[in-house]
Image: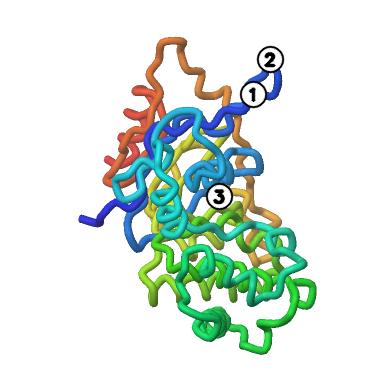
């Protein structure tokens, strides 16, 4: 059985925006990420997927719940040494390749910042050799090292962001919509690069996105979020072949088709959350419909979903 690298247990991230308003950005989600896999996390804008990633990596302190990384609680009290060690093992690639790079730093200094903090180079020569290797790894060359971010295209900047994440030799990378700001022609290049690096370095990814076709391409399993809740979790092929939750069905029905004739006749399925009509004391939770396929549902809905498999 695959080894768990990250365990999310009843994670909550609530933001108090002034009484009596409380935004439940992440509201009690539970899932695991296994070593060497890519878990895709999808949903519409504002559903809480980016907040989930930022809470996992501790950019936000969790309101409640646990995040375990290699069995150790990320949000527990840690010494500065332990936090530094954790920060090296878990890295993040940000959505905006324009805003996530310091415009006043050269590419070499951007990539080497983590190397300097963690003391991974003995001298300046070794530091620059490491920077050059990383640039080549992500498809750039050493001549780029002394340039500034404004001299690069969006795709090149995202490659620099990937190189920066790789610089400290992490085990786990959270990719927060890393291709959404890029041209379609560049998106595939970046995703193929990430898959290549995963094979070569044994990386584990949490890939956050709203492009369902691209998520299917890169992910082993996919989780679907809706208003802070995880509503479905399944292997990628299974989710696309047999979506059960009405919201997942709605998302998949919105994927555009490359055939104009099919696109004209295709029917999109709207999602109405009121159709569930849960009772006040009804227990609604993630339930396993088939091996590895979980759906957020009531007991009555669970029986209905199970019947579809008979």
Q: Quadrant of the C terminus?
A: top left
- Tell me where residue 142 sits by quadrant: bottom right
Asked if marks 2 and 1 touch (Cβ < 8 Å), the reply is yes
Asked if residue 245 is positioned above or below residue 93 in the image, the reply reads above
For the residue pair 299 and 203, the one nearer the viewer reads as 203
Q: Is residue 132 left or right of residue 219?
A: right
Q: Answer yes or no: is residue 262 visible.
A: no
Q: Residue at x 32, y 28 (%)?
A: 303
For the residue pair 170 and 13, the one nearer the viewer reads as 170
Q: Quadrant of the N terminus?
A: bottom left
Q: Which badge, 1 or 3, comes first in the chain's sequence?
A: 1
Q: For marks 1 and 3, give the one nearer the viewer.
A: 1
Q: Which residue is mark 1?
A: 16
Residue 153 image position (x, y, % from top left) = 75, 75
For the residue pair 184 and 100, the one nearer the viewer reads as 100
Q: Which residue is mark 3?
A: 252
Q: Which residue is mark 2?
A: 19
Instruction: Sort mark 2 into few (<14), some (14-19) or many (20+) by Cα contacts within 10 Å.
Output: few
Instruction: Sort mark 1 into few (<14), some (14-19) or many (20+) by Cα contacts within 10 Å.
Output: few
Q: Residue at x 65, y 39 (%)?
A: 46
Residue 97 image position (x, y, % from top left) = 69, 64
CA distance for labels 1 and 3: 33 Å
């Amino acid at each position: 059985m695959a080894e768990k690298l990250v365990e999310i247990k009843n994670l909550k991230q609530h933001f108090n925006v002034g009484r009596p308003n409380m935004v439940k950005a992440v509201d009690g989600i539970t899932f695991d990420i296994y070593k060497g896999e890519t878990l895709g996390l999808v949903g519409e804008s504002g559903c809480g997927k980016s907040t989930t990633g930022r809470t996992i990596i501790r950019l936000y302190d969790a309101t409640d719940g646990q995040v375990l990384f290699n069995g150790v609680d990320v949000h527990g009290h840690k010494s500065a040494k332990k936090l530094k060690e954790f920060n090296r093992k878990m890295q993040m690639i940000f959505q905006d390749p324009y805003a996530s790079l310091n415009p006043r730093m050269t590419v070499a200094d951007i990539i080497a910042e983590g190397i300097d903090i963690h003391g991974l180079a003995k001298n300046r020569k070794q530091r620059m050799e490491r920077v050059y290797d990383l640039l080549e790894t992500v498809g750039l060359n050493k001549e780029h090292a002394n340039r500034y971010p404004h001299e690069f295209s969006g795709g090149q900047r995202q490659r620099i962001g990937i190189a920066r994440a790789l610089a400290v030799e992490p085990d786990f990378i959270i990719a927060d919509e890393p291709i959404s700001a890029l041209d379609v022609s560049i998106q595939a290049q970046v995703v193929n690069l990430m898959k290549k690096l995963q094979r070569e370095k044994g990386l584990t990814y949490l890939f956050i996105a709203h492009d369902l076709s691209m998520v299917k391409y890169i992910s082993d399993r996919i989780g679907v979020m809706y208003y802070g809740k995880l509503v479905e979790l399944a292997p990628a092929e299974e989710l696309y072949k047999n979506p059960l939750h009405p919201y997942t069905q709605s998302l998949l029905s919105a994927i555009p088709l490359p055939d104009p004739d099919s696109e004209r006749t295709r029917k999109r399925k709207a999602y109405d959350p009121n159709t569930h009509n849960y009772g006040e004391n009804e227990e609604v939770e993630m339930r396993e419909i088939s091996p590895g396929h979980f759906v957020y549902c009531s007991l009555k809905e669970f029986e209905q979903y199970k019947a579809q498999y008979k």
